[in-house]
Amino acid sequence: MSQKSKKLVLAGNPNVGKSVLFSQLTGARVVISNYPGTTVEFTRGQLRAEEETWEVLDAPGTYSLEPTCRAEEVAANLVSSADVVVNVVDATNLERNLYLTSQLLEVGVPLIVVLNLIDEAAQKGVKLNVSRLQRLLGVPVIPTVAISGQGLPELVAALPQARAGAGEKRSPEERWIWIGSIVEQVQQVTRRRQTWLEALELASIRPLTGLPLAAIGLYLTFKVIIGCGGWLEDLLESYFFEPFYLPLLQSLGRLLGDGFWHGLLIGNLQNGQIHLEESMGLLSTGVYAVFGIVLPYLVMFYLALGFLEDCGYLPRLAVMSDRMMHRLGLHGFAIIPTLLGFGCNVPAVLAARNLESRRERVIVSAMLAVAVPCAAQMSMIIGLVGRHGGSYLGVILAMLFLIWVVIGLFLDRVLPGYTPSMIVEIPPYRWPSLKAQSQKLFMRLQHFLTEALPFIFGGILLINLLHLVGVIDLLSGALAPLFRGLLGLPKEAVSTLLVGFLRKDVAVAMLLPLGLTAKQFVVGATVLATYFPCAAAFAVLIKELGVRDMALVAGIMLTLSTAAGTTLNLLLETVLPPPYLAAFLLGLAVVLIAFCGGSSDRREDRKFSLTKERGI
C-alpha cells in the first residue's frame, strides 16, 4: 500500500555543502523546478529510507528566515512547508551559521542539524564538542563530510528522531548573545601555520595578484573548453552523424521526394547532397546544430562551470569583477553568465536567472545577445578574419567590447531600479566531488533539453517556414540597398544575415565565397555577431524576458549593429589602419567605464540617504 512521501528540506547558508549532501542522498532522481510565481530555482529528489519515502528539496542558500531577496523568500517558504528540516551548518564557521539555526529552533519545525565539513574544521584547528552542542540545541546533531559520504547513514537513521526545538523568541541582539554562549561552550580553536592553499585563497581576491590569476585561469579554462568541445564535436560527427544519421536522412529524403515536407524537414541539397550545416532543414541543420555543435561545447562549459563553482573560485572571480560590473548596472556575479555566453548564449541566458532582479537579468541578456559571440561563431571569425592579420581580428574584438559597455551604460540609465551591493560568501578552496560534478552536469543538461529544446526547434521551424513561403527572399531584396550604402557589402551578403538567425557560425562561413576584402570581412563578421542571436538563443530570450523586454533588446541590437557596421565601414583603413582603430575603440570603452559608469551606485547611495533621513 503506497503512502504519501514526507517533505524533507535542506536549509543552510550558501556554500555549506547542501548541494553535495543533496546529491549523496538522492542520487540521480532529481528535478530542477521554478518556485511558483518566481524564476528562483530549487532542486527536488527522492530518498528511500527503510519504509518511508522522502521528497528532498534543496532550498536556495539563505542566512536568515527574514528574507531580503526572492531566493531567501523561497527558502523561508520551503522551510515553513516542510515535515523535517535538515539544517546544514559549516563546522568551520559555526558562529555565523548558528543564526539561521536559532531561527529554525524558534519557528518550531522538526529539525536535525548537520555539522558538515568537520574534516576542514579539524585541518583549521577547530575542535567541536558535538554531544554538548546537541544538548544545548535540543535537537539531533550529526557530524558529516558530505563529499565523502561520512555521517550520511547516521543522518538517514536520525530522520525519525527529528524534533522541534524549544527555542524562545529572541531579538537579533539576544540571538547573537545566545550564539556567542553556544560557541564558547562547544568550540576550541588552536593556532597553526597558514597553508599554501590558504595563501592562494588570499592572493585570488587581492587586485595585484588576483587579476593576473583570473586572466591565466580563464584563458586556460577557455582553451580546455574550446579544445575538448571541438574534440567532442568531431567525435560525434565521425562516429554518429556521418556513418548513421546522414544516411538515414538521405533515405528519408528519397521517400519524401521534392516538395514542402522535404524543404521543411531536410532542407536544400548542396550539389545533390544533404549538408548538415547548410541544408537548413529541421531534421538536418536543426538536429545537427543542437546535438552536434551546441551540445559538445555545452557539456564542456557545464563541466568547467561546475568545477569552478565547487572548487570555490567563482565567488572570488565575482569579487574581482564587481567594481567594473557595478559601473555597468550589475554586480560581480553577472560575470558568470557572461562567461557562459562565450560557449553558448542559450545556457548563459538561463544562468542569468540567478541574478537578483529582473532589471539585472534584462541588462545581462541584452549584453549577451548583442556583444558576446558563442564559441562556434568566435572560432569561425578567428579562422576567416584572422587569416588577414591579427589586427583585423583585434578591431572586431574591440568593437564588441565597446558595444558591450555601451549596452550596460545605456540600460543602467533607462531601466528603473538600482544595483544592490554584492554580499557574497567566499568559501575555501576544495577539490570537487566527482559524483557531485556528474550529478550537476546531468541536472543542467536535463534542464537545457527539457526547457530550451522545444523553443529552439520552434524557432528553426519558423525560419524555415518563412523561407519556404518566400519571405526571406523578399527581405533580401529590401535590405540590399542598406548593405551596399551603409555597410559597403554586396547584396549577396543579405542572405548571410538572414541565415545567421539560424546559425551564426554558418553565416560567417557563407561570407567566404563572396570574395570580400579584409575590411568587408571585418564589417560583415561584426554585423553578424551583433545584429541578432541565433534562433535558439532568440527563442530562449523571449521565454525569459517576455515580448516587451525582448522588443527593447531587439531595437538595441538593430541600432548598434547598423551603427557598428557603418562606423567600421567609414573608419577602417579609410581613416585609421586596423591597429590604431582597435586601440581607439578599446580606449573609448575604458574611458566610458571610467567616466560614464556608476549611475546605479548613485541611485543606491541616494536611496540609502533618503531611507536614513526618514528613519526607516
Image (tube, rainbow, N blue to C red):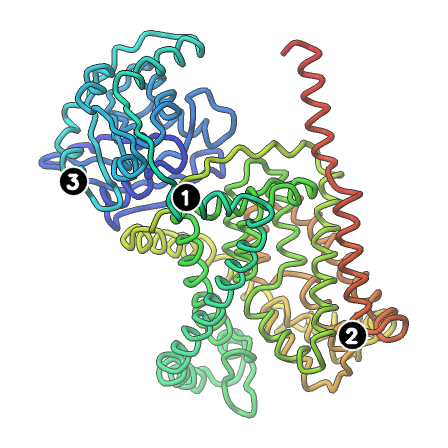
Q: Secondary structure at mark 3?
A: strand
Which of pointers 3 and 1 lies earlier in the amino acid sequence? 3
Q: Secondary structure at mark 1?
A: helix
The residue positioned 32% from the left and 24% from the top of the image is 81
The residue indicated by pointer 2 is: 477
Which of pointers 1 and 2 lies earlier in the amino acid sequence? 1
The residue indicated by pointer 3 is: 48
The residue positioned 27% from the left and 53% from the top of the image is 435
On the picture, is 164 further left or further right than 345? Answer: left
The residue indicated by pointer 1 is: 198
Mark 1 vs 2: CB contact within 8 A: no
Q: CA distance from mark 3 to mark 2?
A: 64 Å
Q: Quadrant of the C terminus?
A: top right
Give the x, y percent position of residue 80: 34, 22
Q: Secondary structure at mark 2?
A: helix
Query: Are there few (<14), some (14-19), or many (20+) residues within 10 Å of tag 2?
Result: few
